[in-house]
Amino acid sequence: MSIRDDFSKNLPYYMSLAGVNQVELSKAIGISKSTVSTWISGRSYPRIETVQKVADLLGCTTDDLVTENPEVIRSQLSEDKKELFRLARNASPAAIRAAVAVLESMEKTNNEF
């Protein structure tokens, strides 16, 4: 994974921990909300001095923002699980069996590597 990818995954996590939304972050460091949005989507990446400003505001380090973080991965997996359960709640038994078959084929593919 690249620094840009890690940053785009880590930024929302640390924003959430700090209780800061995109508008608040953008105002605090003097950029537009759309710029923050492009960072989160991974379409762009800030200069290192801006990463430092963001880290200072969020109470974390620049390394926290730009390196793969197991806590962030776990929190995203948790959100993915919630989404799967939400979708399965209204699915037919046939649709659930089809989804399970897809997931099992993915597991087999991962085990081949």
Image (spheres, rainbow, N blue to C red):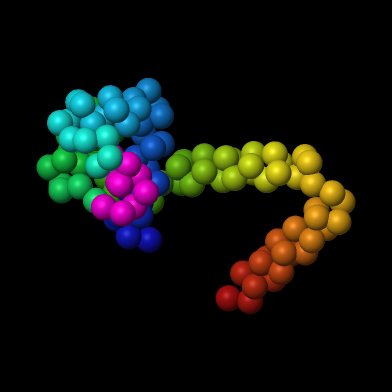
**Residue at point 59%, 40% (across, down):** 78
Magenta span: predominant SS is helix
Residue nearest the observer in this picture, 40 or 14: 40
Q: Is residue 72 magenta?
A: no
- Against 95, residue 10 (above or below) is above
Tell me what residue is drawn at x 37 percent, y 23 percent. Answer: 19
Residue that extends furthest to the bottom in the rendered view of this protein:
112
Residue drawn where x is 30% and y is 46% of the image? 39
- The image quarter containing residue 53 is top left
Please tell me whether residue 47 is drawn above or below residue 30 in the rendered image: below
Q: Nearer the viewer, residue 4 or 99?
A: 99
For residue 106, what is the image quadrant? bottom right
Q: Please, is residue 108 above or below residue 97 in the view?
A: below
Across and down, in percent, residue 11 comes to: 34, 40
Residue 37 part of the magenta segment: yes
Q: Nearer the viewer, residue 84 or 33?
A: 33
In the displayed structure image, the side of residue 70 where residue 48 appears, left or right: left
Residue 17 place in picture, x, y as percent: 40, 27
Residue at x 62% of width, y 69% of height = 110
The location of residue 28, given as percent across then percent down, is 19, 26
Q: Is residue 3 visible?
A: yes
Q: Is residue 76 left or right of residue 41?
A: right
Image quadrant for the N terminus?
A: bottom left
Q: Which residues are magenta?
A: 36-44
Position of residue 54 relative to residue 9, above or below, is above
Q: Quadrant of the C terminus?
A: bottom right
Place residue 87 in its image quadrant: top right
